[in-house]
Amino acid sequence: MISQFEMYLTVENIYFWTNIGVLPFWLLIIFIPNSKFTRILINSIITPLIIASAYVYVLYNAILLDEQIFDIFNLYLDLENLYTVFATESFLLVFWLHFLALSLFLGSWISLDGTKYAIPKVFTGVILILTYLTGPLGLVLYWFVRIFYSKKLGFHD
């Protein structure tokens, strides 16, 4: 018997709540990056565990619905296969959750690294917003700002 909670966990609801759910974490990273509360939530396993739980749940349901889970490996073959994989709502949501988790991790790293190099919060805040919206573009911009503030060109830390 399907519980009321399971009936609520549709692909659309998971998408909506994870998008809304990451916003407080991003606001913490942007406005109070050095607080103990932010460090506990963002720089620990808590947030990735929440997103990973949604990820596993969606993947589990995709397997139960026999959505050809192993077709996901075909996305590496050509662009047409990528269209096919993303045509399935479950897989599209899995990749979106993947993006949310990685961009939040990236935002956390930018925030901590910006503090380390004394980059003004105004710059870091703008870069974090850009990272939230575009991911890699924010990282590239941060890298240029970091070079200016660290006074060195480094590809690893």
Image: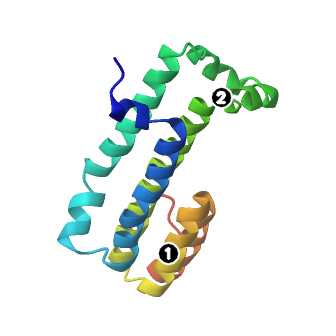
Residue 14 versus residue 72: which sits nearer the camera?
Answer: 14
Q: CA distance from mark 1 to mark 2?
A: 39 Å
Q: Is residue 8 left or right of residue 66?
A: left
Q: Quadrant of residue 28?
A: bottom left
Residue type at mark 2 is: Thr
Task: Please report the residue visible at 58 percent of the width from the left and 69 percent of the height from the top.
Answer: 130
Rate crowding at label 1 as few (under 14), some (14 to 19) or many (20 or more) other CA atoms within 10 Å: many
Residue 150 horizontal/vertical position (percent): 45, 78
What kind of element bears circle 2?
loop
Q: Nearer the viewer, mark 1 or mark 2?
A: 2
Residue type at mark 1 is: Arg
Q: In the rendered structure, are the residues bearing label 1 and label 2 in contact, judged by CB atoms less than 8 Å apart?
A: no
Examine the rendering and report whether any part of residue 6 can be seen: yes
Count the labels in the image: 2
Please tell me whether residue 148 is drawn above or below residue 135 in the rendered image.
below
Q: Which mark sits nearer the N-terminus, 1 or 2?
A: 2
Examine the rendering and report whether any part of residue 151 can be seen: no
Quadrant into which the N terminus falls:
top left
Rate crowding at label 2 as few (under 14), some (14 to 19) or many (20 or more) other CA atoms within 10 Å: few
Residue 101 horizontal/vertical position (percent): 44, 48
Residue bearing the label numbered 2:
88
Residue 53 horizontal/vertical position (percent): 35, 36
Quadrant into which the C terminus falls:
bottom left
What kind of element bears circle 1?
helix
Task: Please report the residue visible at 32 percent of the width from the left and 51 percent of the height from the top.
Answer: 47
Q: Is residue 46 left or right of residue 133?
A: left
- Which mark is drawn over residue 146? 1
